[in-house]
Image (spheres, rainbow, N blue to C red):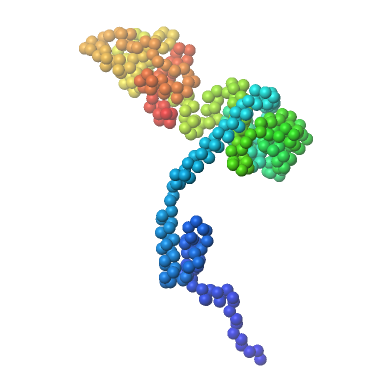
């Protein structure tokens, strides 16, 4: 017959039975709140709640935390500013070296890179690893927003299927300061195998990337702003600068305008600044207009009915001859104003803006000339009227 033996308790239950509940013994989450300032280790005087040492330790720790200065001391502040100035100086020297290089052999390579990109029927495929990759993403975004279709392909993802995004009509722009980034190997091999033009941005002319490229943009060697010479600082600034240089050179060579930029950037404050007056103006039946020779009654009805505060006066060919504003009427007010000819009240050769002008340009004219309405003209004929309120409501300021 088997004897009934009491089951031995599980070690975990023994621990839980002898240990107070979490948060009640000063040994769990509370310990993390009473670290000794600046040392990163728990105080040795912690005892369960109710102990005098525990209470004294918490009180002392909290008091030290309250006394800890959140602002830097003056010597630390000066050292931080010196580091900032030194960083800007070092990076500025790197950009100066890049500028000097553009006047020599590097400039010729830059020209070849522009020609290669302009010949391409497809897009620019930008790639890079690490900090070069981050810079590459920005370069691709700048290309895309300035009329040169481009996107970024991560080198590691390219090796796992994203090479299928690249076609023979594209151009690859690969960034690597050392030119020996292992992750770029498959992209380089793909470009050579399928005759996809390859432009390299590197600092090493004898590197694997530079030797394989159709065009090698070899950046001049420069000191990193990092005091250890390790963190990419000056090098990334130079990469970003040459990317911007390529984008600006391409947009100028293609005649890319602010209106074109508006098509690619309709949102945000920048998009509002690039709005054209044509999208905001009152046109057709909403535009206040009368013909030369109209009576003053017709003028007043047009000003009041369209609520623009003015009316355009056109000749027999529909060209703008002048305008009449409510201010003109007040200045000319007299007992016989209704019998006066229109020409005696109107302002000839009024301020106008051409069709297609930026709303920001119109706003600048309004502010500088103290007017609230401008007529939009095409071939000398008014096609609409834009009010300052229309511009401000659109977010142009």
**In x, y percent, where is residue 208?**
75, 37
Left or right of 228? Residue 208 is right
Left or right of 383? Residue 222 is right
| Observer-nearest of 93 and 121 | 93
Q: Which quarter shows the N terminus?
A: bottom right
Kindly indicate the quadrant of the structure image that contains residue 277. Answer: top left
**In x, y percent, where is residue 133?**
63, 39
Outermost residue toward the left in this view: 335
Residue at the (49%, 20%) spot, across then down: 356
With respect to residue 74, does 8 lie above or below?
Answer: below
Q: Look at the image and tell me whether residue 303 can be seen.
A: yes
| Observer-nearest of 224 and 251 | 224
Residue at the (61%, 86%) spot, across then down: 5
| Observer-nearest of 266 and 14 | 14
Left or right of 122? Residue 390 is left
Left or right of 13? Residue 328 is left
Kindly indicate the quadrant of the structure image that contains residue 242. Answer: top right
Q: Look at the image and tell me whether residue 137 can be seen.
A: no
With respect to residue 242, does 10 lie above or below?
Answer: below
Residue at the (62%, 36%) spot, across then down: 223
Q: How many numbered discs sit on the rendered protein?
A: 0
With respect to residue 308, does 152 lie above or below?
Answer: below
Q: Which quarter shows the C terminus?
A: top left
**In x, y percent, where is residue 126?**
65, 35
| Observer-nearest of 8 and 318 | 8
**In x, y percent, where is residue 155?**
68, 41
Outermost residue toward the bottom in this view: 1
Kindly indicate the quadrant of the structure image that contains residue 6. Answer: bottom right
Residue at the (59%, 41%) spot, across then down: 226
Outermost residue toward the front in this view: 75
């Amino acid at each position: 017959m088997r004897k009934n033996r009491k089951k031995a308790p599980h070690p975990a239950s023994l621990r839980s039975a002898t240990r107070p509940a979490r948060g009640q013994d000063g040994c769990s989450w509370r310990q993390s709140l009473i670290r000794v300032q600046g040392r990163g280790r728990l105080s040795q005087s912690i005892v369960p709640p109710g102990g005098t040492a525990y209470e004294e330790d918490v009180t002392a720790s909290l008091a030290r935390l309250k006394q800890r200065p959140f602002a830097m001391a003056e010597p630390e502040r000066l050292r931080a500013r010196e580091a900032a100035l030194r960083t800007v100086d070092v990076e500025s020297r790197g950009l100066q070296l890049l500028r000097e290089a553009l006047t020599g052999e590097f400039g010729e390579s830059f020209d070849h890179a522009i020609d290669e990109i302009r010949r391409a029927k497809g897009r620019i495929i930008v790639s890079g690893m690490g900090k070069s990759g981050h810079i590459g993403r920005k370069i691709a975004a700048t290309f895309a927003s300035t009329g040169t279709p481009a996107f970024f392909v991560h080198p590691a993802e390219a090796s796992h299927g994203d090479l299928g995004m690249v076609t023979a009509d594209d151009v690859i722009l690969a960034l690597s300061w050392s030119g020996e980034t292992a992750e770029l190997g498959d992209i380089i091999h793909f470009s050579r195998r399928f005759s996809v033009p390859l432009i390299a941005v590197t600092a090493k002319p004898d590197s694997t990337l530079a030797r394989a490229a159709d065009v090698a943009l070899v950046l001049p060697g420069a000191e990193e702003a990092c005091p250890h010479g390790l963190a990419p600082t000056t090098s990334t600034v130079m990469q970003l600068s040459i990317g911007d240089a390529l984008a600006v050179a391409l947009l100028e060579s293609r005649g890319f305008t602010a209106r074109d930029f508006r098509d690619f950037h309709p949102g945000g404050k920048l998009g509002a600044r690039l709005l054209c007056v044509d999208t905001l103006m009152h046109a057709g039946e909403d535009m206040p207009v009368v013909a030369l020779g109209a009576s003053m009654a017709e003028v007043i009805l047009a000003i009041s009915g369209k609520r623009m505060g003015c009316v355009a006066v056109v000749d027999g060919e529909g060209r703008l001859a002048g305008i009449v504003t409510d201010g003109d009427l007040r200045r000319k007010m007299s007992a016989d104003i209704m019998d006066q000819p229109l020409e005696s009240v109107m302002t000839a050769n009024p301020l106008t803006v051409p069709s297609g002008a930026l709303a920001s340009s119109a706003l600048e004219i309004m502010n500088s000339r103290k007017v609230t309405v401008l007529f939009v003209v095409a071939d000398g004929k008014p096609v609409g009227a834009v009010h300052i309120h229309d511009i401000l409501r659109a977010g142009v300021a």
